[in-house]
Amino acid sequence: MNKQLAGLPLLDDFKELPGENVQEFREKGHTLVTQVLNKEEIAAYRPVIVDATEKYNTETRPLQDRDTYGKAFLQIMNLWRNDKEVKQFVLAKRMAKIAADLMGVENVRLYHDQALFKEAGGGPTPWHQDQYYWPIDTNNTITMWMPLVDIDVDMGMLTFASGSYKNGSIFNYEISDESDDAFDNYVKEHHFAISRAKTMDAGDATWHRGFTIHHANGNNSNKMREVMTIIYVADGARITPHKNNWQKNDHQRWLMGKPIGGLIDSELNPLLL
């Protein structure tokens, strides 16, 4: 049972999900759900997440000294393990239930969280598929991407190739200039519709499948694009043999090295509903 922390809303109530969101997610592999958190709730959690991100960020190089991936965002993972207030956000039943409803499953487990803060002047996030990194035997994976501040296209809005998840894993590429070129050509060749919101309010969230091809433009504003993400996997998923070194690393880091073929159910992957 979650214990509510002083001054923070619990977020364990369920939000009724419009049928249009479920249909869009199943057809396109992504959808935007508005007001997952209301203004008061996001105002309460934003300073908590920002403080934890700043505390645990280890990137100190100036933008010009980083590679393409480093310029794309500051990335801090599994904040829930280090900060009890962020933990209340990450393990919240409200977002977990949306994830389960979109995927059509009874329950979900946490894979990991990550703050993705794109600095003013930060570079684009190349086209990629998240599930390239994950040694997971199911397509029932989903990422929630929630801005903590109001954002528009100029700040690096997430952009999707609609329907692209249906073909599963496409390339054995990590996020890089190489992945950007390969996926850009693939998206054009297959005539996927390109979709992105013009604006998102703080507390809105996009949701996308692990194999949905997506990218984000650079941050051309003078403000930090503060985004918190949570990755969920359907309960009952199992660990697959590694297809690349990143999956090998994920197996140890997020799945605690449990046996290949075994259930994803370590203490880092709690059941959320």
Image (cartoon, rainbow, N blue to C red):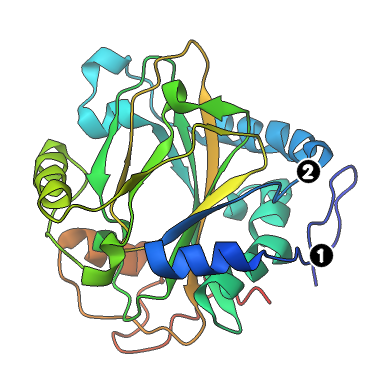
For this orientation, the residue located farthest to the top is 222
In the rendered structure, find residue 147 and report the number of the disc placed on it. none
Residue situated in front as seen by the camera: 233 or 48: 233
Looking at the picture, how far across and down is residue 25, in whole percent?
47, 64
Please tell me whether residue 133 is drawn above or below residue 240 in the rendered image.
above
Which residue is labeled 1 in the image?
Answer: 13
Q: Is residue 223 left or right of residue 43?
A: left
Q: Is residue 128 left or right of residue 143?
A: left
Which residue is labeled 2 in the image?
Answer: 38
Please tell me whether residue 120 is drawn above or below residue 243 in the rendered image.
above
- Distance, label 2 to label 1, CA atoms, is 13 Å
Looking at the picture, how far across and down is residue 253, in whole percent?
38, 62
Specify the quadrant of the image occupied by residue 175: top left
| Residue 273 can be seen, yes or no | yes
Please tell me whether residue 97 is drawn above or below residue 35 in the rendered image.
below
Three-letter residue code for mark 2? Asn
Tell me if mark 2 has few (under 14), some (14-19) or many (20+) residues whose alpha carbon lies within 10 angstroms of its own.
Answer: few
Q: Is residue 7 left or right of residue 130?
A: right
